[in-house]
Image (cartoon, helix red, strand yellow):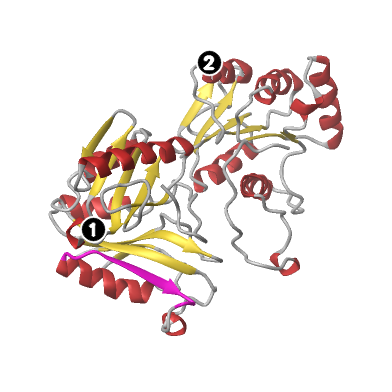
Amino acid sequence: MRCPSGCRPDAPNLVIVRDVLSDLLAVWRAGGTAGVGTVVRTFASAPRLAGAAMVVAPDGTVSGSVSGGCVEGALYELATEVAGTGVPVLQRYGISDDDAFEIGLTCGGVLDIFVEPVSRTTFGELDAVAADIEEHRPVAVATVIAHPDADRVGRRLVIRPHGVAGTLGSARADDAVTDDARGLLAAGRSGVLSYGPDGQRRGEGMEVFVAGYAPRPRMLVFGAIDFAAAVARQGALLGYRVTVCDARPVFATNARFPGVDEVVVDWPHRYLGGQVDAGLIDAQTVICVLTHDPKFDVPVLEIALRLTEVGYVGAMGSRRTHADRLDRLRAAGLTDAELARLHSPIGLDLGGRTPEETAVSIAAEIIAARWGGGGRPLTQTAGPIHAESPERQPISG
């Protein structure tokens, strides 16, 4: 498999159809046909990553976005046409097109968008895929977006860790794409893969977009304080499954944290240790320690900072608290390399004061660490605004 030169293959799997899935399912369950445009490949400074989608329902209503407003008008017309004809189309929008200025992709990027009709007939597994996503079960959808045989365009496989549904038209192609899609799914990535017409590893002619839907990454917030409520809201906004944990039952209540996925009454270190033992912490997990009390902070950080795979570990406190915390962690046997993973005092310097402003600074640091951003105003930087996506890896300090 390979990605054509210049494209950005490693898209996050959080956004793909989740933001439009409920509207798409409503059309599907009603027996209608929606026109769906999905960004399958981007070049240069494109405004949205691969996986962003827009749905045009039979009544003309729209949900989702593929470019932040640049090409939606043109895509609306094309999606409506595709829903009527039933013939999928791979369309490129960008500065290389003669009509780029008219279409309005003025950001300078290039988008490849696959536009297809989606109905019970064309995507019989959609309901099952939606259930997998809702229940946080890993699943990938592999769709042929280009092929010398037009009848194969739009065919798809639904790939799970231990099962496959559908076919791309031949057993050889199914086997090759299944193997590669499972690799992308395990890595938390989506992208376009190229093969020969029958799935040959060497050759060209068939392109397959693999949309990987791994479970949402987790955010663990320790300390049921006002700042925790604001951080939890930011985490949910960013697509995390948020758990708030505190040993004090009077503070750790669902009423104080509406909208989070889970509120746990337990000692932070005991809860985190149990999650580690159960294999529920991975390289995408974000851990925010906001307890501001050494009897809670130090034991949970001992566990968190010794994890070899974790996305982010941050702890709240003043600089004096931070210095005292480091002394306690060193006394507990943590090495300098382990301590270097700690983001403390937590957050970027935005000058915020309120819990909500502090939560924004924490979210900003998590985003910057994940994508390699510097946290500087864009007015002080040069080059593409949307830099090439780095390989996903644990976030270090």
Q: Quick check: 345 left or right of 82?
A: right
Q: Which residue is at a point 42% across and 37% down the rendered structure image?
A: 183
Q: Which residue is at a point 32% across and 62% down the rendered structure image?
A: 114
Amino acid residing under circle 2 = Asp
Q: Is 232 situated above or below 103? A: above
Mark 2 crowd level (few <14, some 14–19, many ≥20, 10 Å Cα):
few
Element type at mark 2: helix
Q: Position of residue 73 (x, y in %)?
A: 36, 76
- Residue at label 1? 153
Q: Position of residue 176 (x, y in %)?
A: 32, 40
Q: Which callout, 1 or 2, points to the residue nearer the camera?
A: 1
Q: Is residue 108 magenta?
A: no
Q: What is the span of residues highlighted in magenta in the rendered image?
A: 86-96
* Label ID, residue 211: none
Compare residues 123 and 171 and report the one nearer the observer.
171
Q: Is residue 140 visible?
A: yes
Q: Position of residue 262 (x, y in %)?
A: 47, 30
Q: Is residue 91 magenta?
A: yes
* Label ID, residue 277: 2
Res. 393 image quadrant? top right
Mark 1 crowd level (few <14, some 14–19, many ≥20, 10 Å Cα):
many
Res. 86 image quadrant? bottom left
Q: Position of residue 184 (x, y in %)?
A: 43, 41
Element type at mark 1: loop
Q: Which residue is at a point 34% across and 33% down the rendered structure image?
A: 135
Compare residues 32 and 309 and report the one nearer the observer.
309
* CA distance for labels 1 and 2: 44 Å
